[in-house]
Image (cartoon, coloured by chain):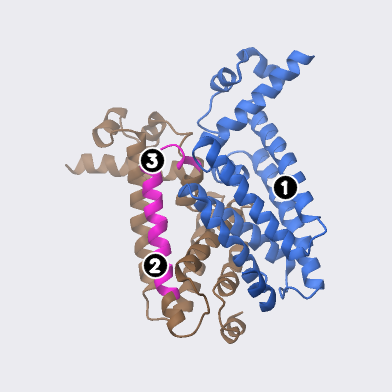
Chain colours: A brown, B blue
Amino acid sequence: MGRTSDAKEKILSAAHSLIELRGYSALGVAEICKTAGVPKGSFYYFFESKEALALAVIDEQWAVQQSDWTRILNSGAEPLQRLRQLFEETEAEQRAGQQSCGTVSGCMFGNLTLEMSNQTEAVRKHLQEIFDAQVEMVDSVITEALQRGDVTVTDTREAARSVVAQLEGQVLFAKLYNNTSQLSALWTNCLALLGARTAQASADA
Amino acid sequence: MGRTSDAKEKILSAAHSLIELRGYSALGVAEICKTAGVPKGSFYYFFESKEALALAVIDEQWAVQQSDWTRILNSGAEPLQRLRQLFEETEAEQRAGQQSCGTVSGCMFGNLTLEMSNQTEAVRKHLQEIFDAQVEMVDSVITEALQRGDVTVTDTREAARSVVAQLEGQVLFAKLYNNTSQLSALWTNCLALLGARTAQASADA
């Protein structure tokens, strides 16, 4: 049992790294197994297909990110400061990735959305659920901020979607230019998108 | 001459459609030639490699889009109205694409950024130049708006990048949910990001 679990974990971990580096379509099962150091036969023992593996990699990545987002967005800090913390940790994570592998890898969910969402409905559905969950978490924080009078938005759900869209767009640029410094605009942009009270905006600018 | 030019155009056009549908990595030269209805031998007469073809497809797409953006962003309309026009035409174009092929295909440059930018430096450089040009064009309009006192941003370049990032992020969601209606948020978000005068924002909301 110990050894088979190991093999599954090795395949998942190799697939995760390879998908971050090169996307999904360019990969073959043989290469994943070679990188993982497991015989190709084990692959199909654990995964029905390459698509099933992609779904497992997405789930694993979301489990980690969801736990990070939950910790940050449910902390005791003031609502807008929690969003600021989310942007700062996102920037730090992208910078750490760049330092370890040379290039900014971006957001795996955004990457796979643009690469795969029109190709497999199972992947599209998974990614929709993840972005729905992200928007829901940000919406809760914006709703709290609105109740305190910190922001002036009228539709908190649409505002949350715009904040997450801004995050995805800026992470796309960070990847394209291999430069994370542009991510520092996220906080100011978030304040603007939420119509944050000027006092708060200037105090924190 | 007529026939060889035809073959090149057919290859470019087939590659364009296939890249929009399925991305770059999943494609093979044989499939492109089959879709184009040209013998595989002609491919290498016109293109050194699949990467060279991708660069040609990107250039051709940018030539069309650059001409649209120039027409819209240099029109005689008031600066902010030109940006509004850009968002409306983007939404209309994505909707037309969805009606013709069933799914929202998104932005080819954004798609290829997330799929390819960490794999080939030539593609990364091309895409950087395109996004630089887009940001530059939007920057010019924001600068005009600033001179008229229509907006309150301090750094027009950063503001332009945020507007383009918001566009890319929202187009990503339109593709993921196969739903262009979310693109209607672009105008309101742009006004917020630019700190547009409230009068303008409410008059146009």
Question: Which class describes the residues within 10 Å of circle 3: few (<14), some (14-19), or many (20+)?
Answer: few
Give the residue number, with chain letter if any, for mark 1: B129
Given the image, on which type of amino acid does mark 1 rest? Glu
Whether residue B201 is visible, yes or no, is yes
Given the image, on which type of amino acid does mark 3 rest? Glu
B46 lies left or right of A186: right
Answer with mark 3 or mark 2, whichever residue precedes in sequence.
Answer: 3
Q: Point out residue A183 in the picture as x, y percentages from the top left corner.
A: 58, 63
Which stretch appears magenta? Answer: A115-142
Chain of residue at mark 3: A
Cα gap from disc 2 to disc 1, whole angstroms: 35 Å
- Does the segment drawn in magenta span residue A129? yes
Q: What SS does tag 3 mark?
A: helix
Question: Which class describes the residues within 10 Å of circle 2: few (<14), some (14-19), or many (20+)?
Answer: some
Decide which of A166, B68 is in the foreground and name it. B68
Q: Point out residue A66 in the picture as x, y percentages from the top left corner.
A: 36, 61
B196 lies left or right of A190: right
Question: Which class describes the residues within 10 Å of circle 1: few (<14), some (14-19), or many (20+)?
Answer: few
Give the residue number, with chain letter if any, for mark 3: A121
- Does the segment drawn in magenta span residue B170? no
A44 lies left or right of B129: left
Q: What SS does tag 2 mark?
A: helix
Q: Residue at x 65, y 57 (%)?
A: B164
Q: Point out residue A78 in the picture as x, y percentages from the top left corner.
A: 44, 82
Quarter occupied by the N terminus of chain A? top left
Cα gap from disc 3 to disc 2, whole angstroms: 24 Å
The disc label shown at residue A137, or none: 2
Chain of residue at mark 1: B
Given the image, on which type of amino acid does mark 2 rest? Met
Using the rendered image, report if marks 3 and 2 lie on a common chain. yes
Quarter residue A187 falls in:
bottom right
Using the rendered image, report if marks 2 and 1 lie on a common chain. no
